[in-house]
Image: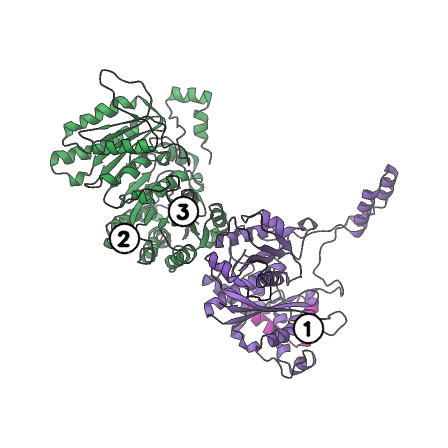
Amino acid sequence: MGDTYSQIVNSGLGKQVAGTLGLPRPSRLRRYTPGGTLIDGPVLVGGHGDAPLAARVRTLLGERGVAVAEAPAADAPSEETLSAVVADLSQVQSPEDLESLRALVGPALKRLGPSSRVVIIGAAPEQATGAAQRAARRALKGITRSIGKEMRAGGTANLVLVADGAIDNADAAVEFLLSGRSAYVSGQVVRVGAGHPSPAADPARPLAGKVAVVTGAARGIGAAIAEVLSRDGATVVCVDIPAAGDALAGVANKVGGTALQADVTAADAGSRILEHCRSRHGGLDIVVHNAGITRDKLLANTDADRWATVVDVNLGSILRMNETLLSDEGIREGGHMVLVSSIAGIAGNRGQANYAASKAGVIGLVDALAADEGVCARGITVNAVAPGFIETEMTGKIPLATREMGRRVNSLAQGGLPVDVAETIAWLSQDANAGVTGNVIRVCGQSLLGA
Amino acid sequence: MTQTRRAAIIGGNRIPFARQNGAYARASDQDMLTATLEGLVARYGLAGERMGEVVAGAVLKHSRDFNLTRETVLGSSLSPATPAYDVQQACGTGLEAAILVANKIALGQVESGIAGGVDTASDAPIAVSEGLRETLLKLNRAKTPQERAKAALGLRPGHLLPAIPQNVEPRTGLSMGEHMAQTAERWGITREAMDELAVASHQNLARAYDEGFFDDLMTSYMGLSKDANLRPDSSLEKLAKLKPVFGDREHGTMTAGNSTPLTDGASLVLLGSDEWAAEHSLPVLAHLVDAETAAVDYVHGDEGLLMAPAYALPRVLERNNMRLQDFDFLEIHEAFAATVLSTLKAWEDEEFCRERLGLDQPIGAIDRSRLNVNGSSLAAGHPFAATGGRIVASLAKMLHAKGKGSRGLISICAAGGQGVMAILEAA
Ligand SMILES: NC(=O)c1ccc[n+]([C@@H]2O[C@H](COP(=O)([O-])OP(=O)(O)OC[C@H]3O[C@@H](n4cnc5c(N)ncnc54)[C@H](O)[C@@H]3O)[C@@H](O)[C@H]2O)c1
């Protein structure tokens, strides 16, 4: 999966040529390594008003040993390189208050190093008490997305919207967005609500003691999810169709988990998965519905079979399995479910009406489950990730020109790696993240599609 | 150690069986056995585990594979501290390996083990001719250039023809099929009866696949996820068209359709003590109750090459105070359809049972609906040493589904006039 373009434009001569022609020069993204630092500080932290979340972020950074920089006085600008800016705008009351953001973040952008981060924190617009407040809160989304497009050298910008009373629940989201785990996540909004997060005893193994199921784990993104969940401490049950059994065994053995050969569309798939988890691993905490297929054709030429197969594998099967996996005997209280959608489900794609139907349906399913009384009562979070262009065997088969397009039309000017999707899923599976449910997080480098 | 315990059968794994020179044409015994072991390790979460032992073998084996099973373990995800050894008992290899491991577990010498076998008819060892071999050895012993030249001069063009392994009995020069044809004639087994058994084998195996029976017994390999030999649409009409290939080529009864083809593949079974299984949260499907291996004098005596299981049965039945009819499932390896039918007929025959087996009563007929209910070698194929593991794992699963206390019998005939038999009981 060599990204030849990146190699060429980053070579000596290539750099020159690319510079002259104004071609994008994708940078090497900072990615998470276990035991590494959260971010190589200093991080500028500020905000509007009493900025209650900024205080929490300073504490968090202190615990992680990251240096905090204070906003310099307007008459004494600083030259020091920053790794990130965190701006707490949760207290904005009216559009004029947004000036605080400009004053803090604007000058700091010039001081950001490679793979830096801008994290804006706001309050939930729908909970605003008046028109001016709601407008100001809503404005943060537009600002964040613009900053994302202004970022250089692998930098990202994201927004965390915190619901009333959920101020204690945002730490895990801020930490994720600052870390290398979110390398390919930009222009996104993470909504944090109620819930009872419990921080990991060992930050290097936030999923220790958990049992996780990953469907479609034999290769591609699913294999990466299995590896990352296992690296983070989980015991992973790897599920794929019998025909993918040999590759599946390789993944399961690599992560020290177990392989379960099952077609997710089979009527008994859910019960077989649950039975396996309970009898072999003592229970189930995390489910990642990743298995998916494409059968591309223009809608005008799509027959009933092509239509039904995609809708059933990508969506119908999840509904059926969930009857068992979300039953009282299923995922334990406080557990997590993550569904894999796609930007095709948000933006639509020519020749992918069936696929887009299934992936948009996945988002609807997340909406329904996150609002489901039973699911909420048991403290189970349900979220989706929507990958953009990810370098896999699947996308490796796309014709070169189309593939180059797919890779470049995003703020990071490159395709993501399976591990990027996996990191987001692993984060959504943490108990520290109990306040995040009903979210759809795009892992797309802020793709222009469907933005 | 005075007390013994019954070894538990926890599960198994095999790769789909391929026809000779088919999907696995370029796979070696070690490749196939490793893939099979990796699938087993993944299914049961054994990565990094130090097992009591791994025992397996191959019938067609290269001399470089002298430590085939240990080399396989070293190339797997199991702990390299897992010991291993090879066994070889022709087609009985896989089952005999399982019995050996089960016996060590029964004696408390090991807590867990993996047993099975592999065979390739495609990547077969080819030996140099005796003449070339002798010349090469002489060359190796030669010390002076003169001696070397003299040794080399001993080489004759005919020496360069390789010796390809053949499926013949060394003491009779007859192929197994020719031997079988003699036995089939003696027992008057008809072409129709053979073809019916073959059709049933294909239909049963196809149904088992449709029901997902093999989802937790098999791991796909090199693009195959079903036995390549399986013909779900096999029918009496189609089989009736085939020409005899053994015995009388005009009026004979044995065709390619009712004989197993040469096949490549591997299988393994996971065994352990009940305690080991519980500690690892693994299911116990069945226990190995007893086993018996018999041999007959097919060279000078008046008995068929593949009739040894007929002799093993009364011994193991008596020891366990059972009748053949007590078994819920019978797994009689289909080397040829005629093997199964001759054996069954012999057990029904009063004279045979009296004269040959020393019984007052014939053993009697069986309920054919209990025979090879999920297909057998005629449909799946028969990579010699891999058949035992295939049957043990499948039967253990079937018994477990049937219910505690149900029993099954395994019967496998082998070259050299031998037969291996085992009794399993559902846990
Ligand atoms: N690669 C991308 O750029 C991209 C982008 C957006 C979304 N996605 C989504 O991410 C997921 C993984 O994609 P990938 O690129 O790794 O694809 P992939 O084809 O490499 O892997 C998908 C896996 O799912 C398995 N699978 C298919 N049908 C199954 C079934 N019925 N039961 C069990 N397993 C089944 C396959 O055997 C395969 O191992 C899919 O849901 C896909 O739609 C991928």
Identify the residue at horizontal 31%, vertical 36% (top origin). A449
Residue A381 counted in the magenta span: no
Give how far apart the Cα atoms at labels 3 and 1 are: 59 Å
Label 1 sits on a secondary structure element that is helix
- In front: label 1 or label 2: 2
Label 3 sits on a secondary structure element that is loop
Which corner quadrant of the image does residue A281 belong to? bottom left
Q: Nearer the viewer, residue A79 or A303?
A: A79
Q: Which mark is residue A187?
A: none
For residue A306, side relative to residue B74 (left or right): left
Give how far apart the Cα atoms at labels 1 and 2 are: 69 Å
Amino acid under disc 3: Ala
For residue A186, side relative to residue A391 (left or right): left
What segment carries the magenta color?
B179-199
Disc 3 CB within 8 Å of nearest ligand 1 atom:
no
Q: Which mark is residue B183?
A: 1
Q: How far across and how far down the image is residue A438, in percent?
A: 26, 46
Q: Is residue B45 above or below residue B287?
A: above
Q: Which mark is residue A378?
A: 2
